[in-house]
Image (cartoon, rainbow, N blue to C red):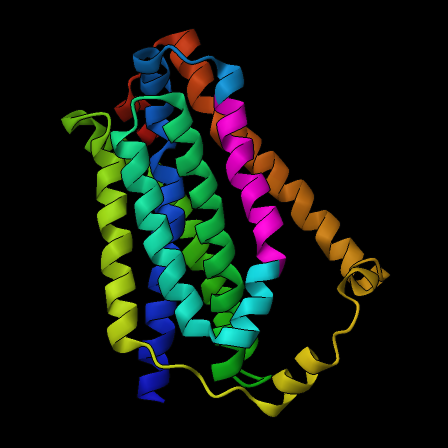
Amino acid sequence: MKNQKVTLGLLLMNLFIAFLGIGLVIPVLPTLMHELGITGTTVGYLTAAFAIAQLIVSPFAGKAADQFGRKIMIVIGLFIFGLSEFLFGIGKEIEMLFISRILGGISAAFIMPAVTAYIADITTLDTRPKALGYMSASISTGFIIGPGIGGFLAEFGTRVPFLFAGALGAIAAILSIILLSEPIRSQENTEQVSGTKNVIKRMIEPKYLLAFILIFIASFGLAAFESFFSLFVDHKFQFKPSDIAIV
């Protein structure tokens, strides 16, 4: 039980770090726009590049987590996350920023399905809802705290938040290599995986489709607001990164 709690804590920390890094960019975006001379349209494309990469890669990453194991996918995802943040931190050309965001989306696609499957493997039907609740809380906390930390670190330099996030990702990957072990898959999960023949057909079933629609609407609204609020207050009220972080 103690080892399970440690494992769950490490998984939640990995998710927290990943979404912390996503949130770090928000208060720094306006400053980067001025530095690189990019438009709000380009910022929208950068945001979309992350999401599209995650959308495309997620189904394949989920299948790979079943085929090659949960741990390896989490570790690779964290290293890719660290690389993406580092590239954004040193990038001077818009092409480099797009590569960084695409890698960021790929890293999220690697981490999320593998962590979710890992949690399902180490919990029972009774304890799983609580564990998944912790998972949701760690994602939300990282996304909430990220802009605050990003705004604070931006006082030391516009690129510092990204280098900080990259270092966190690398540390989390190393800790995962050392402390995580491949979980033993429960019989119920094995049967569910082997019985999934047509994912698309299942996705359009009403019991799944409604959940997907709700998640899509919530994610769409949150991403749109968080991504462009900082641009609005910078243009309208000349907010600094620290001001945006506080908001």
How many numbered badges does the structure rendering display?
0
Residue 146 is situated, as x and y percent measured from the top left of the image, at: 34, 41
Residue 230 placement: quadrant: top left
Quarter where residue 200 is shown: bottom right
Which residue is depicted at the point 78% across and 54% down? 210
Percent x, y for residue 53?
A: 55, 43
- Residue at the far left: name it: 156
Residue 6 point in image, percent of width and height: 31, 78
Query: Which quarter of the rendered picture does the N terminus lie within?
Result: bottom left
Location of the C terminus (image quadrant): top left
Please indicate, yes or no, whether residue 130 appears anywhere in the rendered image: no
- Residue at the (45%, 60%) spot, across then down: 111
Dominant SS in magenta:
helix
Q: Is residue 118 left or right of residue 163?
A: right
x and y, in percent, of residue 93 in the image:
34, 21
Residue at 29%, 53% in the rendered image: 169
Q: Which residues are magenta?
A: 43-59
Membership of 21 in magenta stretch = no
Say if 96 sits above or below 219 in the image: above
Residue 78 visible in rendering: yes
Position of 219 compared to 118: left or right? right
Residue 43 lies left or right of residue 163; in this view the side is right
